[in-house]
């Protein structure tokens, strides 16, 4: 937000010219100057003339917002991601199975018994053995045992879970991230990656589940991978600085093409789109106006299940794709979003046939919400930078009150 701070200090913003003939040319956007007060015009009406007009606001916002972002929804098995432009076009959309068999195996090497399956079998056998021991002990004592205490023997076949191998997950994740951010890109790479913040516990349980730990590990892998990608990209763009006399000087490290990661709480995204329980937490002033916050505090919906939330997110995305001409609506109908999501007919058909629609919908909702939040933050910064400064009232020194003894001494002195 350094560019917005410069607006507040100088009242103007330099935008790079889109023409390729002059790279140093800049377009200066300045707020309209205030005319001299006219006869009969109050000074209170003049501050409204200092605000940016809608065209200037849109130009500043388009300059600050990144051209496109990558939104990633992390899962222990399925990693869904989408590349969304600031115009609302879905450029790329995919889901990756991180626990799929490695291509190097080619399905020819026999896999050992899965640890999760072996542990499940041991647990079933232990519970069956415990039930038999309980019945034998009761027969020896001559007591009656309730059937509810005896566990029925499981006859259904166990479904083998996919093995979790950190090396296999790292290989699959590296391949997926290489598809997202290739080493040699013909066009400019996305400047921002938005990933879902992973929770530390599930449902307030004192225990930390294995899936929670593994998702957090995948999140850390993404941070490390992007950091290494930035370092390699800087080495490719090293350029020597030229001194005033034309000789080459020190090597300059270029950071303009770095990709930054921002972590987004999934609960904030769900509240923004009205998925699940709404109104329990007050939204930030950067994301909701004062009127929206008052309405959110009045709106209370009962908590719903996880599967119902997933169905809501899929239904919302389907509604967007079916009605591309309509603006997206937030949880408050009084202020519709200016953002529009659209994609090709082939991508729409692919989404309709995909099995993991819930993960794909979550990453898209996260991307659109991020653009909405940043757009509102920029607009509030512009409002703040062009607002009339509030005059500070002069501090009035408080005179200490005299005591009764001081009053008596003063009267005695005057006499």
Image (cartoon, rainbow, N blue to C red):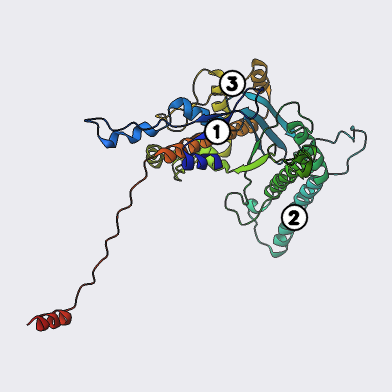
Q: Secondary structure at mark 1?
A: strand
Measure the alpha-carbon separation of dots 2 and 3. 62 Å
Residue 389: which disc?
none
Marks 1 and 3, how far apart at CA:
31 Å
Please identify the quadrant where the C terminus is shown: bottom left
317 left or right of 157? left
The tag earlier along the polypeptide, 1 or 3, is: 1
Q: Name the quadrant containing residue 141.
A: bottom right
Q: Which residue is mark 2?
A: 132
From the viewer's perspective, tell me whether residue 237 is left or right of residue 32.
Answer: right
Residue under numbered circle 1: 14
Most extreme residue toward the top, as rendered?
345
User: Disc 1 or 2, which lies upstream in sequence?
Assistant: 1
Q: CA distance from mark 1 to mark 2?
A: 80 Å
Between 232 and 173, which is closer to the camera in this rendering? 232
Residue 414 is situated, as x and y percent measured from the top left of the image, at 9, 80
Q: Which residue is mark 3?
A: 342
Q: Are marks 1 and 2 in contact (CB under 8 Å)?
A: no
Whichever of labels 2 and 3 marks the residue nearer the N terminus, that label is: 2
Q: Is residue 412 in sight in this rendering?
A: yes
Q: Give whichever of 299, 400 is nearer the camera.
A: 400
């Amino acid at each position: 937000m350094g560019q917005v701070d410069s607006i507040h200090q100088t009242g103007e913003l330099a935008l790079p010219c889109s023409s390729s003939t002059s790279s140093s040319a800049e377009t200066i956007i300045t707020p309209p100057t205030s005319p001299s007060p006219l006869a009969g015009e109050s000074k209170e009406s003049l501050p409204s003339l200092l605000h940016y007009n809608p065209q200037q606001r849109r130009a500043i916002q388009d300059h600050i917002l990144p051209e496109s972002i990558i939104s990633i929804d992390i899962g222990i098995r399925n990693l869904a991601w989408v590349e969304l432009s600031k115009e609302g076009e879905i450029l790329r959309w995919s889901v990756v199975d991180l626990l799929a068999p490695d291509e190097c195996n080619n399905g020819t090497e026999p896999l050992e018994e899965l640890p999760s399956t072996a542990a499940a079998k041991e647990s079933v056998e232990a519970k069956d053995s415990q039930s038999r021991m309980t019945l034998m002990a009761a027969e020896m004592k001559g007591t009656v045992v309730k059937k509810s205490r005896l566990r029925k023997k499981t006859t259904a076949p166990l479904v083998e879970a996919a093995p979790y191998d950190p090396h296999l997950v790292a290989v699959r994740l590296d391949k997926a991230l290489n598809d997202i951010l290739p080493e040699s890109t013909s066009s400019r790479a996305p400047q921002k990656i938005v990933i879902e913040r992973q929770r530390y516990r599930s449902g307030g349980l004192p225990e930390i589940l294995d899936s929670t730990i593994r998702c957090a590990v995948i999140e850390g892998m993404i941070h490390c991978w992007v950091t290494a990608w930035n370092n390699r990209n800087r080495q490719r763009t090293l350029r020597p600085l030229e001194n005033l006399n034309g000789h080459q000087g020190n090597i300059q490290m270029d950071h303009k093409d770095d990709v930054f990661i921002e972590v987004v709480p999934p609960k904030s995204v769900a509240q923004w789109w009205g998925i699940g329980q709404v109104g329990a937490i007050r939204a930030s002033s950067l994301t909701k106006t004062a009127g929206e916050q008052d309405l959110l505090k009045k709106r209370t919906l009962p908590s719903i299940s996880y599967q119902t939330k997933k169905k809501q997110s899929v239904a919302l995305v389907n509604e967007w794709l079916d009605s591309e001409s309509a603006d997206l609506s937030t949880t408050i109908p009084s202020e519709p979003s200016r953002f529009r999501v659209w994609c090709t007919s082939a991508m729409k058909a692919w989404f309709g046939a995909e099995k993991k629609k819930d993960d794909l919908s979550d990453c898209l909702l996260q991307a659109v919400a991020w653009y909405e939040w940043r757009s509102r933050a920029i607009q509030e910064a512009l409002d703040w930078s062009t607002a009339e400064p509030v005059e500070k009232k002069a501090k009035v020194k408080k005179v200490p009150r005299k005591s009764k003894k001081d009053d008596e001494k003063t009267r005695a002195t005057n006499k």
